[in-house]
Image (spheres, rainbow, N blue to C red):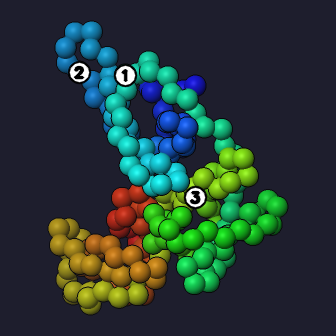
Amino acid sequence: MVKACDLKKTHVIDFDGAPHAVESISQQSPTARGGGTIYKVRFRNVSTKAKVDKTFRSDDALQETSFDLQEVSYDYQSGDRYSFMDLETYESFELTAEDIEDILPFLTEGMEGITALVSEGKILTLRVPDTIELEIVECPPAMKGASATSRNKPATLTTGLIVQVPEYIAPGEVIKVDTKERKFLSRA
C-alpha cells in the first residue's frame, strides 16, 4: 500500500484488477481551515492505454501492483513489430506498435536506458528516459541574427517526431527533447 501523498510517476497502481501507471500528479491545497491537500492523478491503463483521472486526499491508501524493473535496449523494427533485448539475461522479445505507441517517437536503433515493467513474466509497459538526444533532419533554414527568444519553428527529428525549436537551430544539429512534454529543451 502507498499513500496518495507518497505517489510518484514510477508507481503502478491496481484499479479493478488492472494495472495503471501514474502519468501525472498535481496537488492542490485548499485555503479553508482544516482542508487537507488534494492530489489529482492521471493514470493510464497499462493494457488498454485508457486514461483514468482520480482525486485523492493525502492519507488515502492505494494498492500497488507488484512488478519488476528490467533494463532493456531497442534493437530493430520488422514490419509493425519492435524487437527489444533484456540487458541482464540477453533474451529478446517483441512488442507491436500498438503496445508501445506512446514511446515510438523516441525510439532509435540501439537505444539503451529503456525500462520495462514486468509482472508475472508479462511486459506491462516500457519507459524511456525523461530526456533524450535526437538529430534534426528537416526544418526551415536558420535565420541570421535570430534571437534566442520568442519565435519558434517546427523541426522534424530522425524518429519522425516534430517539435518546436528556436529559429536559430539548423538541420543536422542534435537537440535534447523532453519525452514527457514532447518539447525542445536545449542543444546537446
Q: Secondary structure at mark 3?
A: strand
- Residue 122, which numbered label? none
Q: Is residue 169 left or right of residue 71?
A: left
Q: Which residue is mark 2?
A: 30
- Cα distance in 3D space between marks 1 and 3: 29 Å
Q: Which residue is mark 1?
A: 57
Q: Is residue 63 above or below residue 158?
A: above
Q: Is residue 182 above or below residue 110?
A: above
Q: Amino acid at mark 3?
A: Leu
- Cα distance in 3D space between marks 1 and 2: 11 Å
Q: Among all residues in the image, which is located at the extreme front?
A: 16
Q: Amino acid at mark 2?
A: Pro
Residue drawn 46% across the image and 43% down it = 22
Q: Is residue 167 above or below residue 186?
A: below
Q: Amino acid at mark 1?
A: Arg
Would you identify the image quadrant in which residue 153 lies? Answer: bottom left
Q: Which residue is mark 3?
A: 126
Residue drawn 37% across the image and 64% down it = 182
Q: Give the quadrant of the N terminus.
A: top right
Q: Is 74 in front, or is 147?
A: 74
Q: Secondary structure at mark 1?
A: strand
Q: Is 21 in front, or is 166?
A: 21
Give how far across and how far down residue 64 sits, in percent. Answer: 58, 33
The mark closer to the camera, 3 or 2, is 3
